[in-house]
Image (tube, rainbow, N blue to C red):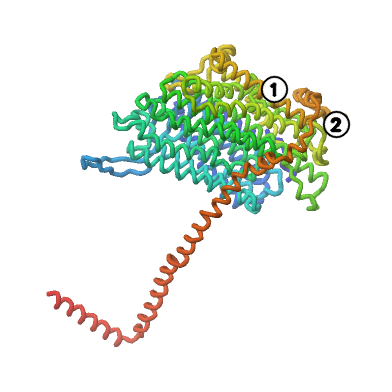
Amino acid sequence: MEEQSKPEWNLLLPILALVSFLFVILRINPELIGFDASDSSFLIIAVPLVVFPAILIIGQVFKGKDWWKYQLKEGGIVALAALAITLALTIWLIFEFFADHAHFDEQGTIFDWITFDLRLEDNTLNESAFSFGIWIDSVSLTVLFVAAFLCFLICWFAIGYMTTDSINEDRNHRFFGEFLLFSVGMFGMVLADSFLWLFIFWEIMGLCSYLLIGFYWEKPSASAAAKKAFLTTRVGDVFLMVGLFMLYDLYHSLEFAVIFGDPTLGGAVHGTDLQWPLFFMFIGCVGKSAQFPLHVWLPDAMEGPTPVSALIHAATMVNAGLYLVARMFPLFSEHHFEGDLSDLAMLIAWVGGITACMAAFIAFVANDIKRVLAYSTMSQLAYIFTGLGAACWFANEGHHHLATVAFGAALFHLFNHAMAKGMLFMASGSVIHEMHHAHEHVHGHDGDHHDFDAQDMRNMGGLASKLPVTSIAMMLGSMSIIGIPLIGGFWSKEGIIGQAWNVYLHGGELILFPALLVLATAGMTGFYMSRMWFMTFAGKPKTEAAKHVRENTPWIKTPLVTLSLVTAFGGILLAMFGFQHFLGEDPDTAHLASHGLLYTLGHAFLPAETTLKLVGWTAILLSAGLGPFIAARMHGGRLDDGEAATPMVSWLVDLSGSVGHTDVGELAEGGFAQALHNRLYIDDFYEYLIAKTILPLANICAWIDKNWVDGVIKFIESGSQSTSTWIRQFTTGRASDYLLMATVGMLVIVGLLWGAV
């Protein structure tokens, strides 16, 4: 596939020109098309929804054609164009939201899906309908931008990653089609104006995750991972569905406008009535966002192509559970429910704290670069759950200002984590891609080296001089996840940790354990993220392949540079403009207003209370100091003589080589390390439980199906055949026989009628 080295901008210029023209026209004079941003928001879903089957059909028909393979990248360019239009519409929507040009307070119905008559208690019929509409506020716009922006960049990255490997040749159209459908699921879920449509798009994402994780279906491990992800998340989805049924029983509707407009229904609904529906819905969130105990599917999801990993971990699926908790937040803040939902808020925080610490521990010993990032995702999402739990507790206890700060910090971390993690997965994909090609360059295609693992960090080392753009991107992304001051995730992570402890200071004693866990996890994050970077980019090359790595693949650098800038500067700019308050306030009053750096530090994340200041500085010292220092002692080192890294990372490599070295061989062989290698035996426990309970039940059901259900059907089938054979004996073909049967039949009918009379 040599022709694929063609410069990317040559193919993108028409797309960029078209989208730019469209955006300018819509921004300057939207009357030309007769509707505004809120009216056009359904196109964010409709455009990729229409394009995805077109890619699948065209790809199947014209598979192998040069124009399809090289000019359109097997549908990649078409998918990128669709996502570019989606991103342009999203940005237009955001502009209009801030300018208040569109009527965002009027959530319009796009179409009626099902119309029916509902009999009320007074025996009257009320015409009802399941309608699809758009719900736009500060939360939905934030998550929508994250999804649209990252889906566009990941698709860009995927064009270079997927179309330059011969293993993917002539089947990339399936990848890009499913990629678009996955994006549709996330866009639709975020924009939906009811829990019903949220659930429908939620399930679309579940289907697409199964298809994309198992993209290399011929690999048993990929097939098993796809089934594991699908079935594990379905466990949570069953609970979510039950919760929605219970919610509908209370409100006779699943529309946000009905539920959030009057959560009490004039006093008919009490806080205690919502405990079980919201609890079951939260279990669905736990499954989708891979939190304990339904977390086991996410590390195995790394069997899918690296762009899929970036898509799941940054842009779509795992953020869905967080978004649903955020959508439940107004019910916690309803003053009539004060105190009734505090225990559920604590449960959310506890699940977050436990998952954060557990995932960080397992990341200590992971050697697969993508699995380190997978456990990092679990841990960072757990931070957000802890922050949302703190916000829900504050809201339910009547501390609405503190709830705003905690809620804003949690969703701000969703933004920062998504940008950093999307970049980190693309950077890891760049490393894996170039390691694979370097290995083939060194050893050829003789088939004697298929046991080489291009994802194992123990085969890397010294890549800082060979992958300058990738090394910078991964350094900035790691700094954001760690919480290095002034970079990306620092602003939101410090806020979450501080607000968790603030709950404790305001009487929420039960949060002490998760608050301690997230504080400890800050230092653990600093260790495992630094360990990943040092093992990959610092020290000496550990294999021949690592010595021959070069950063040559097109389409990969541009997304990395873009997200590097967003990660480095986006967090601090948004923090200075009070982004956390924008997320936490009511959509009618939400706005961005410059507060300044010192104001943000003093009021949002390092408050005046001495205890909280101490917690904040402890988190900084653990994450930015102790964790990276220990990682440098264990895995750092200078590059080979004659090798030089770009100045932006050379200081870090040199620093890691100057702190000395600690041998951890014995520690790595210890019992606790082995337990971590085996994921604390949680997966083994589930497999044992399934083998002892579910499989025997499945065998019983299979026996009943085979012997009873199939037996009855086969009995009816054989009986029908015997009856038809017997009846066929009377079809002799002679007219006299038919006349005789007709006469006998008429006499029988007459006799029956005579007897009835």
The image position of residue 443, as x and y in percent, is 82, 47
The image position of residue 89, as x and y in percent, is 51, 30
Q: Nearer the viewer, residue 714 or 41?
A: 714
Q: Nearer the viewer, residue 69 or 267?
A: 267
Side of 624 relative to 328 (left or right): right
Quick one: label 1, few (<14), some, or many (20+) residues within 10 Å?
A: some
Residue 625 numbered mark, or none: 1
The image position of residue 190, as x and y in percent, is 48, 34
Residue type, mark 2 in image: Asp
What is the secondary structure assignment of the residue under circle 1? helix
What is the secondary structure assignment of the residue under circle 2? loop
Q: Nearer the viewer, residue 344 or 326?
A: 344
Q: Counting residues from the N terminus, which is met first, the one under dot 2 or under dot 1?
A: 1
Task: Tell me where residue 258 sits by quadrant.
Answer: top left
Q: CA distance from mark 2 to mark 1?
A: 26 Å
Task: Tell me where residue 278 sits by quadrant.
Answer: top left
Whether residue 13 is visible, yes or no, is: no
Q: Nearer the viewer, residue 729 or 311?
A: 311
The residue at the point 55 percent across, 38 percent down is 292
Nearer the observer: mark 2 or 1; the answer is: 1
The image position of residue 429, as x and y in percent, is 69, 38
**Mark 1 and mark 2 in contact (Cβ < 8 Å)?**
no
Query: How many tags in the picture?
Result: 2
Report the quarter where the C terminus lies.
Answer: bottom left
Residue 640 numbered mark, or none: 2
Residue type, mark 1 in image: Gly
Q: Is residue 442 above or below residue 585?
A: below
The residue at the point 54 percent across, 29 percent down is 514
Whether residue 361 is visible, yes or no, is: yes
Q: Is residue 103 above or below residue 707?
A: above
Quick one: label 2, few (<14), some, or many (20+) residues within 10 Å?
A: some
